[in-house]
Image (cartoon, grey):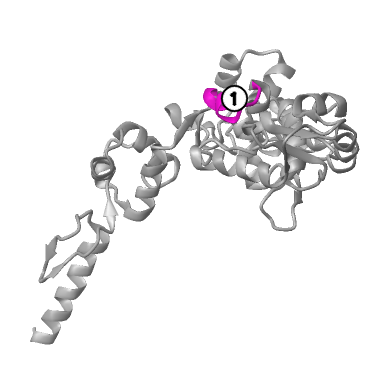
Amino acid sequence: MGYAARLAAFHILRDYVFENMAMPAGSHVLGEDLGERRLHTCASLARECDVDRRTLRSLLEAKGLIPADTAEEALHVFDAHLGREIAESMRRLVPVNSLPKRLRCTRPLAEQLMEERILSPIVTELTWARGRTKKSVDEKEIKELIHRLFVNAKPVGSVPDGMVDLAKAAMKANAPAGEIVHLILAGYLKNVVRMIDGQGFDAIYLDPAEAKAIVSEVMIGLSPMEVFGRLRIPVASGWELVQMGILPSHKILTNDGKHVIHRFPLDAAERFLSEFTTEVHIGAALELGVDGLKQEMKAAGAKPMLLKTEIGARIFRRSELPERFRL
């Protein structure tokens, strides 16, 4: 082999090493130093960022950077930049049960903000992600929500006559407070103020008459929670189905595209259940417990279209089920 061929082979081999092996910056390979780390393993990233390895692994699995439930995590490498972003987000985890205090709002509103995906858990890709990763929100997202809320509210020193806080506005509009928040963020409500010396949602006041009128005008159909409740599936599973397009929603978009409101037709649950079903619905129709039903369905060769490990619930296509289970 001539010199040029050997040199080319060295370059190919060196590039292969740099692109496929987790090596720290400065590593010397075949005559060249690696200027910046390109790949990490879970262990090397945990050391570099000084974060808990088990929590990091859960996040990396959920984000798809390493395979789930593998005992050989050290063999799997991933993009160092993406890994660092995930590791840094761990430092900003805010537990869901701390949201009311952090946002200065009621617990029911905090729950609605999560259910409506106005705020999202740090892990949404896989609803079965372990531990606190599925029960926490990124601090950056919380700050962005408060910023957007305040941008859509006029600063005042005192509450104008006729204006009420969010809870009272929701009560007068006969709508969940989370829906009122949607309308504020989307810019539909114009008569919204915030107390200059207030914090979070406690600072917000609005015209209840306007809120009631806009709710009836914009919030047509069913909310995500109403549909997921009728389907008797977990909230996270419902959103997975929405993202997949299996459970279509009507999206109400703002002009700038920064806020989306999901609404559903009145018969959304019935449409879904005409084509798909779950063990909850089958078991209820057959008056069978879940354990007994699973054994019977397995014996009959019934296979789910979507697994619990994929979306947090087992979804079956009716046409693919044995006749007994098409209920």
Residue 315 in sight from this viewpoint: no
Where residue 134 sits: x, y (%)? 49, 31
Residue assigned mark 1: 100
Quadrant of residue 240 in the image? top right
Determine if the magenta segment contains residue 105.
yes
Q: Is residue 211 above or below residue 300?
A: below
User: Neighbour class for label 1 at 10 Å: few (<14), some, many (≥20)?
Assistant: some
> Is residue 22 left or right of 313 when viewed as pictured?
left
Helix, strand or loop for the magenta stretch, by majority: helix
What stretch of residues is rendered in magenta? Answer: 97-106
Where residue 131 sits: x, y (%)? 43, 26
Q: Is residue 242 above or below residue 174?
A: below
Observer-nearest residue: 133 or 96?
A: 96
Where residue 152 sits: x, y (%)? 72, 46
Q: Is residue 55 above or below residue 34?
A: above
Quadrant occupied by the N terminus: bottom left
Residue 219 in sight from this viewpoint: yes
